[in-house]
C-alpha cells in the first residue's frame, strides 16, 4: 500500500484571545485539538460537524492558510509546516481550495478571463499566448463557454459563480482540493448540478479531495470516508458506508437522527440532543461531547477518550463503544 | 396523530383562519421597471394545520409572507391585487397602525435570524411584556409574569432569571427560543415562520422543530412554514405549496406531494436532493438543468419549460393554469394528465 497523499498527525490549532490594556493572551479558542487522519490518493474524505467543530480550520491549516499550533501535516511525504517560501509556492500549485460563498470569493472588478489566467501567470504555467485558450478549456470543463470570458462575476448566477470558483481552482492542475462547503450556499436544484460536476471532475482528473460540509446527505453522496468532528476533536471516522449504516459514537447517532428525512411516511422519534454546543474557549473536561451526551457516565468527565478501532478502518472516540 | 385530527376537521370546512386569494405583489425597481414578485398566489390555512411554502431563491415565498404581515419594504413593494383574509376580515389594505394591531396579536412571526426580531438594548422580558401590554392592556406585573411563563413554555431553563437577560447574554439556540416566546406571548391564531431553522445546526434545528410541534398541539395555532428544505417540509407539514418564479406550481397534502409529485419541477426537486442512505447504490443525482429565471426576464408560456425534461413546443407558447386534479391536489402543468412522474421520483 502506498503512502497516503495527505497525512495529518495530532494537529492542534489554538487561536489566542487577547485582553487587558497590555493585550496579553488571556485565553484561547481551541479550534482544533489533536486531530489525526489520512487521505489516500484518489479518494474523497468528508469532514462533517456543526458550528465550532473546527472542520474549516482543519481545511485551512492543511493548506497552510493558517499555521498549526502543534502537530504535523505531510503532503506527499513533505512536512508542510516546514516549507520555505519558494517550496510553499510549488506546494500551493498542487493543492487548491474551493470556498463556500461564490459571491465573496471572486473579485467583482475582474473579468472571468483575468480570474482564470491569474493563477497561470502566478505559477508561470503555459506561454501567455496560450493562456486564453487554457481559460476557455477550463470554462468548458465546468460547463460554461468562451462567451463568458469577458464578463464580470455579477453577471452570473450563484451556481455559475461556483463553477467559476471551481475552474479557478483547477487552473493550476492541482492534485488535491479542499472544498469548504462548496454547495451549501446554492439552491437545491443547482446544488445537484455542482455535486455532479465535482464528481465528474474528480474522476476525469484523478483528484483527491477533502470535502468539508455540514450537510450529511451531501457528504454521504460524494465521500469515500467520513470524519465526524465536535468541538475541535474527531468523534468518529470510517468509510461512508460503515459510518452511516452503523454509527458507533453517540454524537454521530444523534447527528444522523437529527437530519430531517424528505419522506413524510418516515417521520420518526428522534434522539434530540439537549442544550447548545459549548464554547470552544472553555470546552468540557474529559469527553467534549459529554455535556449533551444521552449516555454520559461519571468517567466521561475525567477521561479524554481516544479513537479506538470498532471495525475495519472504523474508529470511535467513546469509552462506551470499545 | 395530529394529522388524523386535521382530517376529521376537514369534512365540514369552517372559514379558514387565513385565506389568500390571487395575491399579486409588485416591486418597483425604478421609475420604469416593475417586477411581480408574487403572481396570483392562493392558499388557505385552517386551525391546527401546518402549511409549508417551499421554493428556491426568487420563488416569491418570502415576499408572500411579508405581504401577509404587511411588512413589504416601503415605497418599493406593494400589494397590487388579490385579497388576504384573516378570520374572514380583509387585511391587505389596512393602514400600518391597523396592521401593528394584528401583528403579535393574531399573527405571530419568527424569522431566520432572531436578532431581526429581538431588540439588543432591552431585556428579553421587557420585550415580551411590551408585546403583551400593547395588545392586552394588562398591568406590568401580569405582563412580566406572562414573559416568565412563556420562557418556561419554550424550554428556557431558569426562566425567572433569564427574563432579565439581554439577547446577547443568551446562546443562539436560546435566542431562537426567546424569539418564539415573544411571537407566541399573545397566543396568536397563526404563526408565520420564515426559514426559522435555516441558520441553525441540525441538532438545534431538531430541538426547534420539536418545540414548534409541541407548542402547536398545546396552543392549537396554525403554522405557515416557509422553507427551501424539503426534509423539514416532510417533517412538519400537513399541506404543501410549491412556488416557482413567483407562482404556485403545485399544492397538495404532504403525503401526495412527496409520494406523487405531478408537476415536473416538484418531481425534479425531489430527485435532486441527496438522501441519507441512498448513496449505497451510488446513483448519480438527477439535477434540474439551467437556472431559476430572473423575474425581469421570465420565459414565455410555462415559466419552468426551459428547464423541463417533458416540455413540448406548446409549453413555450401557452401559459398553463393551476388546475385541480382532485382531492385538493393542484397542478400547473399543461401535461399533468398524461405524465407519470411517480416512478422517477420514488427511487
Image: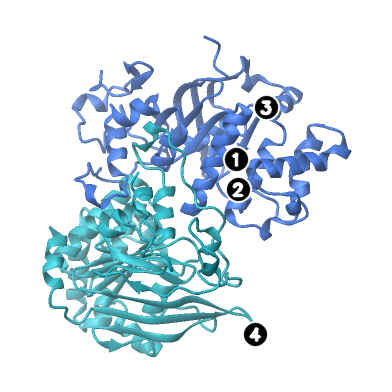
Q: Which residue is labeled 4 in the image?
A: B31
Give the residue displayed 32% in from the left and 51% down from the top.
B205
Residue B33 lies in quadrant: bottom right
Q: Which residue is labeled 2 in the image?
A: A162
Quick one: which chain is blue? Answer: A
**At numbered mark 2, what does the secondary structure look like: helix, strand or loop?**
helix
Q: Which label's residue is closer to the chain start, 2 or 1?
A: 1
Residue depth check, mark 3 versus mark 2: number of the one nearer the observer: 2
Q: Nearer the viewer, residue A133 or A20?
A: A133
**Residue A177 x %, y %:** 60, 32
Q: Nearer the viewer, residue A240 or A52?
A: A240
**Residue A166 x %, y %:** 63, 41
Q: Which residue is labeled 1 in the image?
A: A98
Q: Which residue is labeled 3 in the image?
A: A94
In this picture, residue B12 sits left or right of residue B75:
left
Q: Quadrant of the C terminus of chain A?
A: top left
Do marks 4 and 1 both belong to one polypeptide chain?
no
Which chain is mark 1 on? A
Amino acid at each position: 500500500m502506498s503512502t497516503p497523499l495527505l497525512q495529518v498527525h495530532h494537529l492542534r490549532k489554538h487561536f489566542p484571545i487577547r485582553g487587558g490594556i497590555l493585550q496579553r493572551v488571556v485565553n484561547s479558542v481551541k479550534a482544533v485539538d489533536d486531530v489525526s487522519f489520512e487521505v489516500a490518493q484518489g479518494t474523497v474524505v468528508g469532514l462533517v460537524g456543526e458550528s465550532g467543530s473546527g472542520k474549516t480550520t482543519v481545511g485551512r491549516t492543511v493548506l497552510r492558510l493558517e499555521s498549526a499550533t502543534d502537530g504535523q501535516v505531510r503532503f506527499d511525504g513533505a512536512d508542510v509546516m516546514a516549507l520555505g517560501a519558494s517550496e510553499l509556492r510549488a506546494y500551493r500549485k498542487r493543492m487548491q481550495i474551493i470556498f463556500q460563498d461564490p459571491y465573496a470569493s471572486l473579485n467583482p472588478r475582474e473579468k472571468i478571463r483575468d480570474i482564470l489566467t491569474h493563477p497561470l501567470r502566478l505559477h508561470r504555467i503555459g506561454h501567455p499566448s496560450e493562456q486564453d485558450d487554457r481559460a476557455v478549456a477550463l470554462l468548458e470543463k465546468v460547463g460554461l463557454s468562451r462567451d463568458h470570458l469577458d464578463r464580470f462575476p455579477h453577471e452570473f448566477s450563484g451556481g455559475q459563480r461556483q463553477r467559476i470558483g471551481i475552474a479557478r481552482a483547477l487552473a493550476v492542475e492541482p492534485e488535491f482540493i479542499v472544498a469548504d462547503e462548496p454547495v451549501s450556499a446554492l439552491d437545491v436544484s443547482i446544488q445537484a448540478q455542482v455535486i455532479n460536476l465535482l464528481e465528474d471532475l474528480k474522476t476525469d482528473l484523478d483528484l483527491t479531495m477533502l470535502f468539508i460540509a455540514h450537510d450529511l446527505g451531501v457528504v454521504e453522496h460524494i465521500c469515500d470516508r467520513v470524519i465526524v468532528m465536535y468541538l475541535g476533536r474527531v468523534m468518529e471516522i470510517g468509510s461512508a458506508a460503515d459510518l452511516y449504516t452503523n454509527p458507533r459514537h453517540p454524537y454521530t447517532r444523534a447527528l444522523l437522527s437529527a437530519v430531517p428525512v424528505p419522506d413524510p411516511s418516515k417521520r420518526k422519534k428522534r434522539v434530540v440532543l439537549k442544550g447548545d454546543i459549548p464554547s470552544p474557549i472553555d470546552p468540557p473536561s474529559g469527553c467534549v461531547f459529554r455535556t449533551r451526551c444521552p449516555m454520559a457516565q461519571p468517567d466521561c468527565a475525567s477521561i479524554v477518550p481516544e479513537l479506538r478501532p470498532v471495525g475495519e478502518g472504523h474508529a470511535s472516540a467513546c469509552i462506551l463503544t470499545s | 396523530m395530529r394529522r388524523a385530527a386535521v382530517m376529521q376537521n376537514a369534512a365540514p370546512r369552517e372559514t379558514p383562519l387565513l385565506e389568500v386569494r390571487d395575491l399579486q405583489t409588485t416591486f418597483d425597481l425604478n421609475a420604469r421597471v416593475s417586477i411581480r414578485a408574487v403572481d396570483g398566489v392562493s392558499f388557505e390555512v385552517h386551525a391546527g394545520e401546518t402549511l409549508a411554502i417551499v421554493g428556491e431563491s426568487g420563488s416569491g415565498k418570502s415576499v408572500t409572507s411579508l405581504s401577509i404581515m404587511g411588512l413589504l419594504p416601503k415605497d418599493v413593494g406593494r400589494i397590487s391585487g388579490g385579497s388576504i383574509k384573516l378570520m374572514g376580515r380583509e387585511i391587505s389594505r389596512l393602514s400600518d397602525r391597523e396592521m401593528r394591531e394584528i401583528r403579535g396579536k393574531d399573527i405571530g412571526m419568527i424569522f431566520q435570524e432572531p436578532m431581526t426580531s429581538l431588540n439588543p438594548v432591552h431585556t428579553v422580558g421587557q420585550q415580551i411584556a411590551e408585546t403583551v401590554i400593547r395588545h392586552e392592556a394588562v398591568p406590568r406585573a401580569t405582563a412580566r409574569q406572562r414573559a416568565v411563563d412563556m420562557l418556561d413554555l419554550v424550554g428556557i431553563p431558569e426562566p425567572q432569571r433569564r427574563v432579565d437577560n439581554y439577547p446577547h447574554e443568551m446562546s443562539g439556540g436560546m435566542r431562537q427560543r426567546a424569539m418564539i416566546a415573544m411571537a407566541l406571548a399573545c397566543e396568536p391564531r397563526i404563526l408565520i415562520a420564515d426559514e426559522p431553522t435555516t441558520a441553525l445546526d441540525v441538532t438545534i434545528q431538531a430541538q426547534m422543530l420539536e418545540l414548534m410541534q409541541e407548542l402547536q398541539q398545546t396552543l392549537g395555532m396554525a403554522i405557515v412554514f416557509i422553507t427551501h428544505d424539503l426534509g423539514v417540509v416532510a417533517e412538519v407539514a400537513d399541506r404543501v405549496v410549491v412556488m416557482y418564479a413567483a407562482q404556485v406550481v403545485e399544492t397538495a397534502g404532504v403525503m401526495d406531494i412527496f409520494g406523487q409529485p405531478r408537476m415536473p419541477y416538484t418531481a425534479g426537486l425531489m430527485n435532486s436532493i441527496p438522501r441519507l442512505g441512498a448513496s449505497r447504490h451510488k446513483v448519480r443525482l438527477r439535477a434540474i438543468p439551467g437556472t431559476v429565471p430572473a423575474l425581469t426576464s421570465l420565459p414565455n408560456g410555462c415559466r419552468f419549460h426551459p428547464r423541463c425534461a417533458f416540455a413540448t413546443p406548446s409549453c413555450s407558447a401557452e401559459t398553463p393554469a393551476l388546475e385541480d386534479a382532485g382531492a385538493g391536489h393542484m397542478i400547473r402543468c399543461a401535461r399533468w394528465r398524461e405524465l407519470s412522474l411517480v416512478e422517477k421520483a420514488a427511487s
